[in-house]
Amino acid sequence: MRAKGSKRNVLFVIVITAFILGAIFPAQAAEKVGKEKKYTLEWLSQPQIVEKFGKISDAIWSYAELGLQEYKSSKILADTLEEAGFTVERGLAGMPTCFVGTYGSGKPVIGILGEYDALPMLSQKGRVSQQDPIVPGAPGHGCGHNTMGTAGIAAAIAVKQTMDKYGLKGTIKFFGSPAEETLISRPHMIRAGLFDDVDAVIDNHSSSGFGTSYGTSGNALFSTVFTFTGRTSHGASPWGARSALDAVEIMNVATNFLREHLLYTYRMHYVILEGGEAPNVVPDKASVWYYVRNSDDRLENMYKKVINCAKAGALASGTELSMRVIAAVHQRYANKALAELFQENIELIGMPEWTEDEHDFAKALQKDLERPERGMPTRVSELRAPSDVFVGGGSSDVGDVSMVAPLASIWFPGQVPGAIGHHWSSVACNYGSTAWKGLNAGAKSMAASAIDLLTQPKELKKIREEFEAQAKICPYKPFLPEDATPPLDLNEELMKKWRHLMEKFYIE
């Protein structure tokens, strides 16, 4: 399947153009919009701008690069910022695909986050409602990061255009953040001082809805590879051997018994990375990769218990244990005052208008997934308050950023309601017309919010005061060990395996 050259692109550009000319934002809200924000939204509504960033998103979707291997994805985003007049620093915090684009000078400094890594094993043709991989077994964008990095740079460039036209003071920064799917980059970026001068941070994420939230969410996490080293032998005479695979299996049995005694807020998953190559050779090396998740106040105690299970495996099997922490992140603490500002702009922008063809695709996908056949969403969400009971099992390294600067997230539309995260169905949604419209709505809400932060010092002061009060209650202490370095080799072999097979389908 080749995505480029599709006749659908021409059709949905025409449809998007008609929609934009008819409604840049809801008419009833137009009188409340200042000239700076109005100009920002009009700039993003230009058909050639919608198409430009839509094509960038589709290109990144086709690259589908795994974390810390996003060489083409990070380059197209960084190059686009540079061409727009941003100063771009590349290869930051020990990661070749990490970059920061900066425009302006002085205070306030407003940051926008962006991600662009894909997920393994999710290759799928775009806008096809049944599972149909482009390259079976290859990576795919099952979380919408292709739209997120693109929406972020579109917003940053729109703000730059407005700053130039109206002489606005301050600085806009885009933080190109690799490997979010493996929760790696942000703690290293914080350690490198990249967020030291930032007054507020705008995060964004692809979604089937359009909204924001505040308060504590997600789970903190330790991502660790446990490796056991033993002594090999022929399987016919194993009495002199020390099986590293035995150690892995003993550890896994112990952690599974541990589950009964953990509070329901926990999550724990593992995969055996290495366990030998032949049944008749006792493996002298084996490794298992664990995600250990819980709330901030429970995580470290749970992690110690998991380490004890690993030590038990080593002791029982007579092997040596070593550990490599891949990532360690906090829960997210979203700023209420910032989320309230985001909500106003989300309501101002409104949900995109979807075509009949887009609703039909959504219904076909929903039917295949055995979900209610309701089509694309039609209304924005209300501001979501935090749960009093359970904050969810997912994790993101955005959590660490929320502890060093005021942060909230905008969830922008484009995906089909009922599509499954980290699944081929999400990959199918993240390409084409709905993705273009969704990321444009996300860019508008981010850019409008950034303009508010640059022009309304009282709002920014309120946001900062809330953050400082939270920081006194929960000061930032990195979970990431001091000696941890970015695992640049993590997905290297996987991308080498797939890249040459995927290249023929790249959209340039």
Image (cartoon, rainbow, N blue to C red):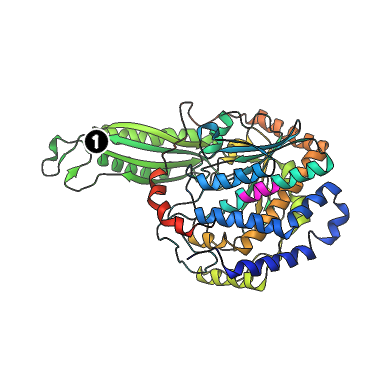
Sort mark 1 into few (<14), some (14-19) or many (20+) by Cα contacts within 10 Å.
Answer: many
Instruction: Please tell me how many numbered marks the rendered image carries.
Output: 1
Magenta-colored span: 150-155
The amino acid pointed to by label 1 is: Ser
Q: Quadrant of residue 111?
A: top right
364 and 86: which is toward the camera: 86
Q: Residue at x 66, y 56 (%)?
A: 52
User: Does residue 132 appear left or right of residue 33 in this picture?
Assistant: left
User: Does residue 348 appear left or right of residue 398 in this picture?
Assistant: right
Residue found farthest to the top: 482
Mark yes or no: residue 82 visible.
yes
85 and 428: which is toward the camera: 85
Q: Main secondary structure of the magenta part?
A: helix
Mark yes or no: residue 381 visible.
no
102 and 308: which is toward the camera: 102
Q: Residue at x 81, y 49 (%)?
A: 37
Residue 200 spot, x, y in % from top left = 70, 37
Q: Residue at x 34, y 43 (%)?
A: 252
User: Does residue 319 appear left or right of residue 394 in this picture?
Assistant: left
Give the vertical position of 247 relative to 363 (above or below). Answer: above
Residue found farthest to the right: 31
Residue 258 is inside the magenta segment? no
Residue 412 spot, x, y in % from top left = 66, 54
Give the vertical position of 353 relative to 143 (above or below). Answer: below
User: Does residue 164 appear left or right of residue 325 in this picture?
Assistant: right
Give the vertical position of 327 relative to 350 (above or below). Answer: above
The quadrant in which the C terminus is found is bottom right
Residue 451 spot, x, y in % from top left = 78, 44
- The residue under label 1 is 317
Residue 68 spot, x, y in % from top left = 48, 42
Residue found farthest to the left: 237
